[in-house]
Amino acid sequence: MFEPARSVKVIVATMALHNLCERNGVPIPQEGAGDDRGNDGLDDLPFPPVRPGDAQDGVDARQRVIRRHFERRCERNLSL
């Protein structure tokens, strides 16, 4: 169980991710997707093996997404 302050952070982060997905057209998974064991279907995807440097690639990709998000947000605010 989380402390209330941490729970709020988790909820806010979840809402932010949801809104980001909505804005970028990521489809919402359908209820009942996956099998009865709670499988999210990711086991069926052909993930490539993890290689050295993949973590840094992920960090770089995350930074690009964050930068693009806030650049768009700033552009919208400047145009008001």
Image (cartoon, rainbow, N blue to C red):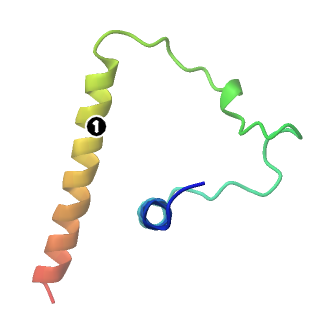
Residue at the image position 52 percent from the left and 56 percent from the top: 26
Residue 76 x, y percent position in the rendering = 20, 78
Left-right relation of 58 to 19:
left
Question: Which quarter of the rendering shows the C terminus?
Answer: bottom left
Left-right relation of 49 to 29:
left
Element under label 1?
Answer: helix
Residue 12 x, y percent position in the rendering = 44, 67
The answer to whether 20 is drawn above or below residue 61 in the figure is below
Left-right relation of 69 to 28:
left
Residue at the image position 74 percent from the left and 56 percent from the top: 30
Q: Which amino acid does label 1 sit on?
A: Ala
Residue 41 x, y percent position in the rendering = 72, 35
Residue 51 x, y percent position in the rendering = 38, 10
Task: Tell me the crowding category of disc 1: few under 14, some 14 to 19, or many 20 or more residues within 10 angstroms, Cα based.
Answer: few
Instruction: Residue lying at the far right in this picture: please name it.
Output: 36
Residue labelled with disc 1: 61
The answer to whether 61 is drawn above or below residue 25 in the figure is above
Residue at the image position 80 percent from the left and 41 percent from the top: 38
Residue at the image position 23 percent from the left and 34 percent from the top: 60
The answer to whether 54 is drawn above or below residue 32 in the figure is above
Instruction: Residue lying at the far bottom in this picture: please name it.
Output: 80
Left-right relation of 40 to 51:
right
The answer to whether 39 is drawn above or below residue 13 in the figure is above
